[in-house]
Amino acid sequence: MEKEIKILVLIIGAGPAGLATSACLNRLNIPNIVVERDDCSASLWKRRSYDRLKLHLAKQFCQLPHMPFPSNAPTFVSKLGFINYLDEYATRFNVTPRYNRNVKSAYFKDGQWIVKVVNKTTALIEVYSAKYMVAATGENGEGVIPEIPGLVESFQGEYLHSSEYKNGEKFTGKDVLVVGCGNSGMEIAYDLSKCNAKVSIVVRSPVHVLTRWIVRVGMSLLRFFPVKLVDRLCLLLAELRFGNTSRYGLVRPKNGPFMNKLITGRSPTIDVGCVGEIKSGKIRVVPSIKRIEVKRVEFVDGKTKNVDSIVFATGYKSSVTKWLKVDDGDLFNENGMPKREFPDHWKGKNGLYSVGFGRQGLAGISRDAQNVARDIASLVCQRSKNKLSK
């Protein structure tokens, strides 16, 4: 049995991107519905993030449209603080997502987006018909665990994605391998080390490691100075803070941290203490994994190590292609990411938009949401004028 629902704008996803988009549309009195597959908003933050997580950027770079963080909020907001902020944001702007809605398909037909959704609570199929559709599921739709010979068929320990990791308490005394040297990988490795696990971290590629303060300085200066000049200053500050990190297996990319972000989309890693643990020998840096057999991990340099557990901090991928089978909006590529580069990534054809796919973090989400809302408002206004003129 199907239930048909007509709406002007359908937003898919109730993370920060979906909440921000709905809030901006609500302020413009544009009708919209947000559907979310989980039973809460911001499920990545509430259900799939580790306990010690904090925003890696200063609060002014992480706020959503039309609601700054309170002046008494810390510069770097905690996980709980950000969750509370998101809940207050939804309340203030009357954002009321429909939860437990799993999108099965979306296609464009006769000037409308037809979206079939399973209501997991009632098992009913809901068919939404919308003039405009916003994909707000973002870059972090689902966790990625790389295919490694022997991992699935042979490994006798525990392995998990970083989205399943909460804290290091149950790993005390165990040999744990963390795969990935981004923010999640370095922070989880540090957390494990502080819980007295025996930690190794796989560093597969060059990485910029900075402090929160250095990144804050750099982002502030980017408003006034060219990126190459800001990069030089940040690298000088990093050298003074950490010394030559290549001695410890942390080789920096050829491009500076902010230029590298523009070119590759990869943000610099914010150190929370992991570099100090690496320097002291408490955390060992190892290269890429070649294969796994039982509990023995062989690395590409030929060395081996026995491990009890593996935490894959290997990132996420978009889930758009699971439900947008044919991109009639000409917006997404085969990997579920925008075909066009930032800053032209957010608008497609036939009323299809994306929010949170620009590799620009929360600041990018804020810009995308406002761009989308303004664009839809202008189109709605133009349609109204055209009707009146007839």
Image: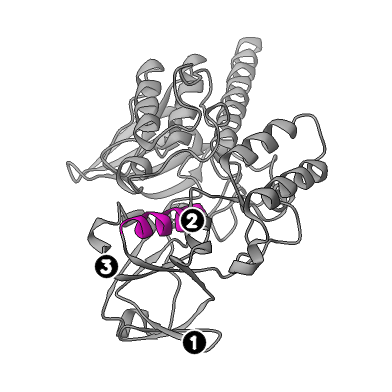
Mark 1 is surrounded, within 10 Å at the Cα level, by few (under 14), some (14 to 19) or many (20 or more) other residues, namely few
Q: Earlier in the sequence, mark 2 or mark 1?
A: 2
Determine whether the residue tagged by mark 3 lies in a helix, strand or loop.
loop
* Image position, residue 112 (x, y; %): 49, 37
* Image position, residue 289 (x, y; %): 48, 79
Q: Give the numbered dot on residue 274.
A: 2
**Which residues make up the magenta segment?**
183-195
Q: Is residue 286 above or below residue 86?
A: below
Does the magenta segment cover residue 186?
Answer: yes
Q: Amino acid at mark 1?
A: Lys
Q: Is residue 253 left or right of residue 13?
A: right
Does the magenta segment cover residue 137?
Answer: no
Identify the residue under disc 1: 303
Residue at 36%, 21% in the rendered image: 88
Q: Is residue 235 left or right of residue 146?
A: right
Q: Nearer the viewer, residue 302 or 147?
A: 302
Q: Which quarter of the image is occupied by the C terminus?
A: top right
